[in-house]
Each structure stands twice: as C-alpha cells, then as structure tokens.
Image (cartoon, grey):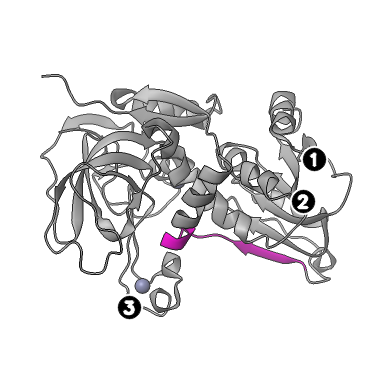
C-alpha cells in the first residue's frame, strides 16, 4: 500500500510503498477514505512530542470502511462491526483496561495508552489497522471528508468544552478548527462565545462573529464582561495568565492542547478566589460517542480543505504557516491500477 511515512522528526514525510498491515486479535483492517491533519501531527513532525514510533504513519482522524476483521472481535463490543461498515478511528488507539484510570472510566489517562498516528501507525495511507474497541460507528448524514475533523478537533474540543461546566460566558483563545466546531455546540446549548484571535486578525474575528460569537477581539484585549470560563486552543502558554485575568471569581481556564509553550509567572491574586487552571488529555470513548450524537443534533458543519495523500507535506506546511482555510483533510482514493 501507499503511505506517507515519517522516518525522522524534522524531515518531510516520504511517499513509500509498504506491506499491507494485517489485523490482529480484535482489530479491523480499514480502507482509508479520508484522514484529517491535526496540529498534533505538526508537533510530532517538529519534535515537540517525545518518542514517536519510527518509522511512523501519521494521522489520527481516520474515516474508512472495514475491509477485513481480525479474530475474537465481538467479545465485549456492544455493536460489533461488519465488513463494509464505515468507521472512525480517533487519537486514543488502545488502553490496558486494568490500571486505576481505566477502571474508573478515565481511560484517557491510562498508564499504558497507545495513540493512533503517534505510538501506533495511523491513516496517512491506503490502509490502516485499528483496535475495534476504540473505533466509532459514524452517522450516515455526513460525508467522509466532513467526518474526519470531528474525530479530533471536534472530540477533544468537546472534552475541553465539557470541562467548562455550565459556564454562561465562555471565552475561546485561538479561534481555529477546534474552536470553530465546539462553539457551534456551545451556541446550540445557549452559551455566549467570546472569541479571542491573534491581535489584528480582523478576518478571524469577523468569522467568529458570523458563527454567532457575541464578542470577538484580539487576545490582547479585555472582554466587555468577566468570563465564567475560557478554553485555550492556541499552543501559547502566555495566554494562561491573560485568560485568568479575564475570568470572574470561581472561573476555569481549560488548556485544550497536547503541547503548549511555557507559562510565564503571574501573581497569586490572579488565581485566588477559586479560579482553576486545568488541562485536557486525549479522549474517552464516551466523549467520542457523546460528541457524534450532539454533532448530528446541532448539526455541526466543519470547513474542509482537501489534499491528496501525496500532498500531505503541503497540508502540514500550510498548517504550520497558518495558511489553511479550514480543517485539512487528506482524501485518499484507491490507487488506480
Ligand atoms: Zn488531533
Ligand atoms: Zn489503563
């Protein structure tokens, strides 16, 4: 099969012809139709996340169809998969099911978790293998390319959003793909969105307003009212004290990314009055199921910019340079032979 392979961090992906993967016990072999490109992929390529599997096939927002089923599949799956089913594969690819986190429905924090497109091979390829326990059935109402961004930007954004509790006034710092998806849910649920973009990014602010944000401005501006919670999607640690200063008493700042630059020191009084700083790591299967269910009700629409498999490096470069107009998705059609 064809795959875009990361052989060494800091170098471009290489188009390679590699042996087809084989599904093991409890695994599915999936013919990939679409695979989202995530900021996390950039962090891996740019050596900002330690110890990826090497060589590695990136990609953890996989939409495809079941082509082969490994043995012993249906043991404890509520809804088993059959050949031809359309499935989604997210970031969380495997957990041990035994550690203290797994036994308390917090498998996102599992001691020995494995991650798609990081410590397991992912979906920048014609075929991918995934453990069926972590795959999702996908709603028919969406097309393949529309679903891919929901599997990470959507699901992890949703977990960040849920951490804000019942906050009425919700600030979002970094109004990119995750913010775009999650603010549709928040507005559907009656929250007020305060969108913070890079200072001077008028286009981004206009877009946030057109999506329904009650206020949009630069991250150097103060919102007109104190916020009940804020989510930071930008990988910029300096935004943590900025967001704290925008909070009302008892408010929460949620750091929604897997990687962030260092957080500068700030006076304790900015944290005092029971303000909280927390982060979000990975997702649980429950997050994924809940999000797909609400996505359909809203219904959430993802903006997509499509690339071919061979153009994965172009997609990553445009992402790094902030030149994408929506979620980058690799559209992968079977090789013509
Ligand atoms: Zn991701
Ligand atoms: Zn575990």
Mark 2 and mark 3 lie on one chain; the one further toward the N terminus is: 3
- Ligand 2, by image quadrant, is bottom left
Q: Residue at x 36, y 29 (%)?
A: 330
Left or right, 180 with reference to 21 = right
The quadrant where residue 14 appears: top left
Q: Which residue is mark 3?
A: 98
Mark 1 is surrounded, within 10 Å at the Cα level, by few (under 14), some (14 to 19) or many (20 or more) other residues, namely: few
- Give how far across and how far down residue 267 sits, in percent: 81, 64
Quote the CA–CA distance across marks 2 and 3.
39 Å
Q: What SS does tag 1 mark?
A: loop
Q: Badge 2 local density, few (<14 within 10 Å), some, or many (20+)?
A: some
| Marks 1,2: beta carbons within 8 A | yes
On whether ligand 1 comes within 8 Å of the CB at mark 1, the answer is no
> Which comes sooner in the sequence, label 1 or label 3?
3
Observer able to see residue 109: yes
Q: Residue at x 24, y 40 (%)?
A: 65
Span highlighted in magenta in the image: 275-287
């Amino acid at each position: 099969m064809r795959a875009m392979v990361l052989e060494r961090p800091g170098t471009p992906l290489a188009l390679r012809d590699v042996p087809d993967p084989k599904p093991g016990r409890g695994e599915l072999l999936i013919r990939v139709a679409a695979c989202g490109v995530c900021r996390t992929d950039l962090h891996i390529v740019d050596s900002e996340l330690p110890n990826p599997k090497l060589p590695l096939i990136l990609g953890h927002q996989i939409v495809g169809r079941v082509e082969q089923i490994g043995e012993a599949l249906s043991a404890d799956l509520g809804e088993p998969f059959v050949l031809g089913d359309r499935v989604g594969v997210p970031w969380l690819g495997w957990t041990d099911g035994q550690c203290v986190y797994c036994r308390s429905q917090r498998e996102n924090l599992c001691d020995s978790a494995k991650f798609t497109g990081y410590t397991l091979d992912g979906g920048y390829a014609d075929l991918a293998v995934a453990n069926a326990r972590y795959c999702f059935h996908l709603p028919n109402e969406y097309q393949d390319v529309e679903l891919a961004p929901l599997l990470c930007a959507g699901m992890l954004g949703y977990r960040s959003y849920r951490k804000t509790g019942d906050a009425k006034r919700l600030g979002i710092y970094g109004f990119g793909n995750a913010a775009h998806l999650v603010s549709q849910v928040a507005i559907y649920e009656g929250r007020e969105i305060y969108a913070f973009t890079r200072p001077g990014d008028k286009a981004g602010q206009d877009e946030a307003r057109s999506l329904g944000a009650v206020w949009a401005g630069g991250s150097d501006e103060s919102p007109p009212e104190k916020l009940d919670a804020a989510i930071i999607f930008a990988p910029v640690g300096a935004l943590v004290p900025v967001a704290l200063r925008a909070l009302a008493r008892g408010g929460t700042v949620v750091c929604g990314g897997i990687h962030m630059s260092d957080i500068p020191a700030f006076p304790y009084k900015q944290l005092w009055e029971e303000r909280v700083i927390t982060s979000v790591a990975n997702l649980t299967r429950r997050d994924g199921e809940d999000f797909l269910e609400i996505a359909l009700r809203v219904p959430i629409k993802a903006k997509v910019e499509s690339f071919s498999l061979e153009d994965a490096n172009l997609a990553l470069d445009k992402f790094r340079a902030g030149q994408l107009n929506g979620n980058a998705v690799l559209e992968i059609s079977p090789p013509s032979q």
